[in-house]
Image (cartoon, rainbow, N blue to C red):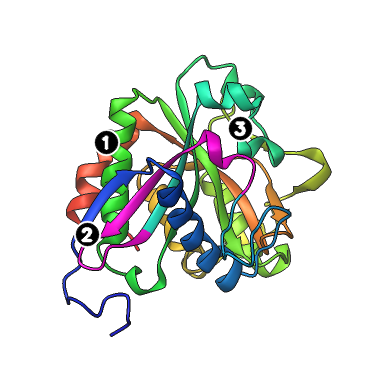
Amino acid sequence: MSQTQSQTSEPQYRIALAQDADQLRAAQRLRYDVFVDELGGCGPQIDHEARLECDRFDPFFDHMLLYDDATGVVVGVYRLLRQDAANQIGQFYSEDEYDLTRLRQTGRRFLELGRSCLHRDYRGGAAMHHLWAGLAQYVTEHQIDIMFGVASFHGTDPQALAAPLSLLHHRHLAPSEIRPRAQPAAFQNMNLIAEADLDRRTAMLQIPALIKAYLRLGGTVGEGAFVDHRFNTTDVCVLMDTKQLNARQSRIYASGPTR
C-alpha cells in the first residue's frame, strides 16, 4: 500500500472548490505530479522548484478538489471555466487549440473543463466517480447547457494513434452546428484509417479511460486533433450536452467508477 493511502484501506472522499492560495497550490502540485512528472509536460509558467503546474488561466477558473479526508491529501482535480470568467480573460483555454465559433453562436450556457487528473494511487477505484458527482452538482447549480474541453492521448505521433483517432472521427463527431475545429496552424486530420478497415475493439482499447467515460455519457468530439508538444500529448476537443448527461449519469454512476 502506498504512503498516500497508508492510514486507511477505505478512502474518505470529499469534494470542495478551492477557496484560497494554499488550496490552489494543492491542485497545482497534483497537476505537476501527473502532467509534468508522469507525462513529461513543460510550459513557461511551470514552477519546477516548487513543483507546481500552473498557467495564466488559473486565477479565472474554479478548481474542484477531491480530498481523501483519511489522509488530508488532494487526490483529484478538475479545472472549470464558465462563460463570464472566460469573458474576463478574452478567451477560453481551449481556443488556443480549437476554433469555438460555432459553439459560441449557439447562445447556450457552456462550461470548459480542463486539467482533470487523479493521483496515481486512486486510479481504478471510486475516485473518478466522486469527481463526476461533484461535476454534475456544479453543472446543475450553474445551469450549464454544454460542457467542453480538450482531453488528451499520451504522445505526439498521430500515426501511433491512428486507430483511436479514426474511430472518434467516424463514430463520435459532434453535430456540425456546434462542432469545434482544430486551429488551422496545428490541424491534425483524425481520418487516418477508413472506417471499413478499422478494428473497432482494438481502437477503443487505445482510447484513454477519461475520454471513454465522456463517450459513455454521450460525449462527442470536434473536428481534427491538436498535437501539443509542450505537454507531450495529442488533444481532442470533447463536448457533452448536459441534457444527455442528466439522462445517462444515474446509469453510469450505478455501474461504478469509470477509471
Image coordinates for residue 52, horizontal then vertical, percent: 56, 60
Whether residue 89 is situated above or below residue 222 in the rendered picture: above
Image coordinates for residue 124, horizontal then vertical, percent: 32, 70
Quadrant for the N terminus in the image:
bottom left
The residue identified by callout 3 is 92
Quadrant for the C terminus in the image:
bottom left
Image coordinates for residue 178, horizontal then vertical, percent: 56, 27
Which amino acid is tagged 1?
Answer: Gln
Secondary element type, mark 1: helix
Is 211 or 12 nearer to us in this picture? 12
Do tag 2 and tag 3 residues touch (Cβ < 8 Å)? no
Disc 3 packing (10 Å; few <14; some 14–19; many ≥20): many
The residue identified by callout 1 is 137
Whether residue 171 is situated above or below residue 59 in the rendered picture: below
> Distance between the Cα atoms at labels 1 and 2?
18 Å
Residue at the (63%, 27%) spot, across then down: 89
Q: Is residue 119 visible?
A: yes
Which amino acid is tagged 3?
Answer: Phe
Quarter of the image for residue 160 reads bottom right
Q: Is residue 221 visible?
A: no
Q: Is residue 256 left or right of residue 92?
A: left
Do tag 3 and tag 1 residues touch (Cβ < 8 Å)? no
Image coordinates for residue 255, horizontal then vertical, percent: 20, 57
Q: Which residues are magenta?
A: 55-75
Q: Earlier in the sequence, mark 3 or mark 1?
A: 3
> Distance between the Cα atoms at labels 2 and 3?
32 Å
Secondary element type, mark 2: loop
Which amino acid is tagged 2?
Answer: Gly
Q: Earlier in the sequence, mark 1 or mark 2?
A: 1
Is 190 or 149 nearer to us in this picture? 149
The disc label shown at residue 256, or none: 2
Is 199 or 114 nearer to us in this picture? 114
